[in-house]
Amino acid sequence: MLGILFTILCILFGYELVTFLVPDTRRLFLAIAPSKNTLTQVPDYAFKLPAGTVVGIALISAVTYFISLGYSYVLTRGQNAILAGITTSAVIFLYLTITLFVRNHKDAIKAASASAKIPKFNTAILNIVFYGIATIFFTSVAAFLFFYTFRIHNGILENGYSVFSDLAPHTAMTSSFGVGSNFPTQYMHFSGDGIQYHFFFYFFCGILEFLGLPLDYAINLPSIIAMVCAFSLLGLLAVLLSGRKMPYFLAPLLVLFRSAFNVFDELKSMHKFGYSFKYSLEVLAKSTTWFNNTPRDDWGIWAINVYANQRHLLFGVAMILILVILFIPYVRRLCISLMNKENNPLKTFFIARNSWLPRKKDPIHPIKNLILALIIVVVMPYTHGSALIAALLILFGMAIFSENRLSYLILAVVAVTSSFIQTRIFSGNFRDFVLFNYKTGFVSEATDFSGMTRYLIYITGLTLVIAFIFAIGWLIKDIIYKKPIYRTLLVVCFMFPLIFAFNVQVSLEMLANHKFIQISLIMADIFVSIVLSNMIILPVKMAKREVVLPTLLSLDNDEVEKQLNSEGILGEPKNKGLRLPVPAFIPAQVLSVLVALCLFVGLVGTGVAEWCTFININKNTLNIDTNSELVEWIETKTNEHDVFLTPMWFTNRFYLAGRPAYYGWPYYAWSAGHDTDKREEIYLWLVSGCNGDINEFVRYCKEREIKYMIFDPEFFELEDKQGNPAFNAEFFTQNLKQVAYFPNDNNTIIYQIY
């Protein structure tokens, strides 16, 4: 219950903070949307609620962490530090929430009168039902996705087969705060070496576990919130850019069912072997392996599985979307200024006051908006570092085509400074944290431009193709009708993370760049959803009366064009829209819907097949007993800071106790930037008995605070680099004190080292 209350406090505070810093949401929408009529399609809460939720959770988590960290230096028992931190933080933010609520209530009256002429959300029952059903759908899918793969049933933690590996370090990190005291914070599979992995999301999960939520709810609830908020903001941006409600639902749907050509290749291959189409579909529906048509595809890195693995990814995406929404008005305004014939284009673009500074008395409150953006980027480095890099890349592209570039510059400086400070605090070495090495090709086998392009189109299917066709079409249309071309520019800017991923190596594992590609594809889905919605319901109307052909034949060309325009057939008359006569409109609409359905099948086909694989794989689970005697003993008999010498476990009931291992599964630590080669050498030296020298063994363990050793049968499977048994069991049984034995828990023994 306390965990739920803390989450509600985060949401309420975030909502009031966003309301205060974005006091006129309608004007923000107006500055983004191509038409005033668009504003009748979207309610204020479509931005305030998801943005407030994300900002509230991110900010309160970060503040609570640093308060708890401070308490950890003066309180002897670590769990008291997080209790004091949560209590202090709750009091502070409860006070701020009430204060902001009172202030916002007073300002609401002024804001209402100031924006009285701006269209309000049409509260017709159909609009409310639409947004309600969409939100319920997003929530239901998220709940299924996360609880299907990670749940506690009758005391057994069931980890789905496709997620247990990636979730292992996240589960350990959550428990390190929920039942341990990970201050100063270290990587739970690699103790004593700081942490280079962004963990604030899992610190929030740890808070919820500490406040009484079961581990599965403590991780799944924030995961659901992250997905719903990201999808809501994604859909909102799609509506604002299109003027239609349908993309609010379609854009997230395209994220859930990704586009690629894999499934069609599989069907083609099975057809060559003589399989019927029906049988081929049945084979795909029962598949338990990911597609393996491109490198690492068989890891499921592009499938829906990525969101079940990386629970914090969509939380980072939501933060990117908030930043993009806040800054789009400046892109649109520069485009409008450049269209003004009275302005000198070069002066307007490069040296005009508005190109670098906020407009005077700007009704969208650029200073307040900048403060909100600064709050986001300050907490982003250890909430989701890759998302911060992607956000800066997108905003860099937008800044080129924007007014108020000084705000972008301030944001970038603060983001880099925050990253530098937090990295020095947590990992101690900024250089090793991010590489930024030039390396082309991502993981594709071809590194030339044409080869990378083929690879990219194959793994993304129709998404990028449709997005770029849309961008070109929209560019031509906006030029013809003399409208700002900012939407085309946004398509280009949203591709910056993807371009970056194919040219720069950020971490030791190049595959980690897939997150940048994923983010660009999510943003591209906005435009694909707009294309589909425009095809399902054509952006034209039926003319009230038909144009009589004989009449047109009697007129010259100029008179014909004038007549057609008067009928609403040519051009785009203000407040009328494009019109077609009934005989042309009906077949055009039917054909358009059929084409849209074919495109939709092509877009989601691979995603549907991967959902089947996802469901099939995760019918099998890796189970961990949450009522383990080992876990209970560690929690009650040891100090939260005690380090354990264990087998190289990737996941184990041990990590539920919230204690760090000296050397857990090395892949996790290696991919997070730690020196695993050196640690492995020392680890093998320790478990072999330090050449029979117990004094040397104890000396080193004291130096590294390794107080206990878990004598588990899995140690006997350990081999050195020559393939010989590496574990010296006799050394430990003769020299160490046995403090616990669990015959009913894998015959595990715990030895105290000192």
Image (cartoon, grey):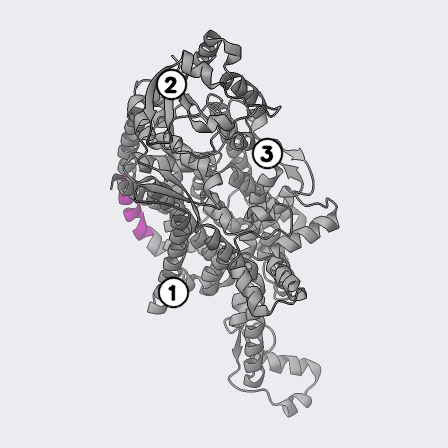
Identify which amino acid the numbered label 2 is placed on. Tyr
Tell me, yes or no, whether the highlighted magenta stretch contains residue 275.
Answer: no
Judged by its main secondary structure, the magenta piece is helix
Q: Residue furthest bottom?
A: 550
Q: Find residue 749 and report its horizontal and vertical position in percent.
A: 37, 23
Which residue occupies 28% across, 43% down? 4
Decide: marks 3, 1 in contact (CB < 8 A)? no
From the image, tell me which residue sits under label 1.
130
Residue matched to label 2: 751
Disc 1 and disc 2: Cα gap in Å?
61 Å
> What's the distance in space between the residues labelled 3 and 1, CA to CA?
42 Å
**Quadrant housing residue 468:** bottom right
Q: Compared to 200, does 495 lie above or below?
A: below
Quarter placement of the N terminus: top left
Read off the magenta span: 99-110
As helix, strand or loop, the secondary structure at mark 2 comes to: strand
> What element does badge 1 sit on?
helix
Question: Do tag 1 and tag 2 residues touch (Cβ < 8 Å)?
Answer: no
User: Mark 3 packing: few (<14 Cα in 10 Å), some, or many (20+)?
Assistant: some
Q: Residue at x 52, y 50 (%)?
A: 328
- Look at discs 3 and 2 and give the one toward the viewer: 2
SS under mark 3 = loop
Horizontal side of residue 538 vs 655, given as left or right:
right
Query: Which residue, given by chain and number where applicable, does mark 3 sit on?
Result: 507
Question: Dot 2 surroundings within 10 Å: few (below 14), some, or many (20 or more)?
Answer: many
